[in-house]
Image (cartoon, rainbow, N blue to C red):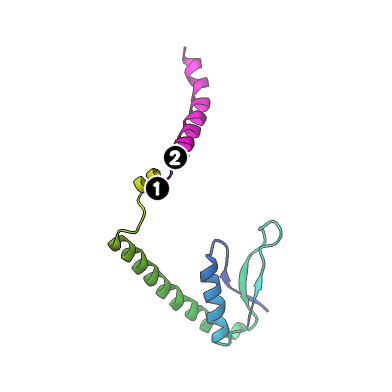
Amino acid sequence: MAKLLFKLKNVFDDEADEVRQLLTENNIDFYESPAGNWGISLHALWLNDDAQFATATSLIDQYQQNRTKRIKAEVQAQKDRGEQITFLQSILNKPLQYLIYTGFILFILYISIIPFIEIGH
């Protein structure tokens, strides 16, 4: 009977590819179930052989620990080089988009709050 190994919902494509490659390189027999037409099915990797479950989970756990360390190091390196975009820089890069979004948010807040203000008068 198949056993759930790794859920792929909200997983980056590169991470999913690396996990598939890791399992393939270690001769772990698995298959992938798609999310379906509407994305409501369980998109995951499943083991065909329950005996390989301990090996597969330990490989994935080790991979995720290494990936976490690698991503944190990359982010820190970007910060150190000054390449990480700050909130202010993103506003200055697209000021018109920021003003449109801010105006839309203020409009929605106004529409939401005005009935309560008018009841008070």
Name the residue tied to disc 2: 98
Q: Nearer the viewer, residue 93 or 62?
A: 93
Of marks 1 and 2, which one's residue comes earlier in the chain? 1
- Where is residue 4? Give x, y as percent: 60, 73
- Residue 65 seen by the camera: yes
Crowdedness near tag 2: few (<14), some (14–19) or many (≥20) residues, C-alpha within 10 Å: some
Q: Nearer the viewer, residue 96 or 6?
A: 96
Q: Residue furthest top?
A: 121
Q: Is residue 117 magenta?
A: yes
Relative vertical location of residue 35 with respect to residue 19 in this rendering, above or below: above
Give left or right: position of 103 versus 46. left
Name the residue tied to disc 1: 90
- Quarter location, residue 27: bottom right
Give left or right: position of 92 versus 22. left
Question: Which stretch is magenta?
Answer: 94-121
- Residue at 62 percent across and 75 percent down: it is 46
Q: Is residue 12 magenta?
A: no
Q: CA distance from mark 1 to mark 2?
A: 9 Å
Q: Residue furthest left?
A: 80
- Where is residue 76? Give x, y as percent: 32, 64
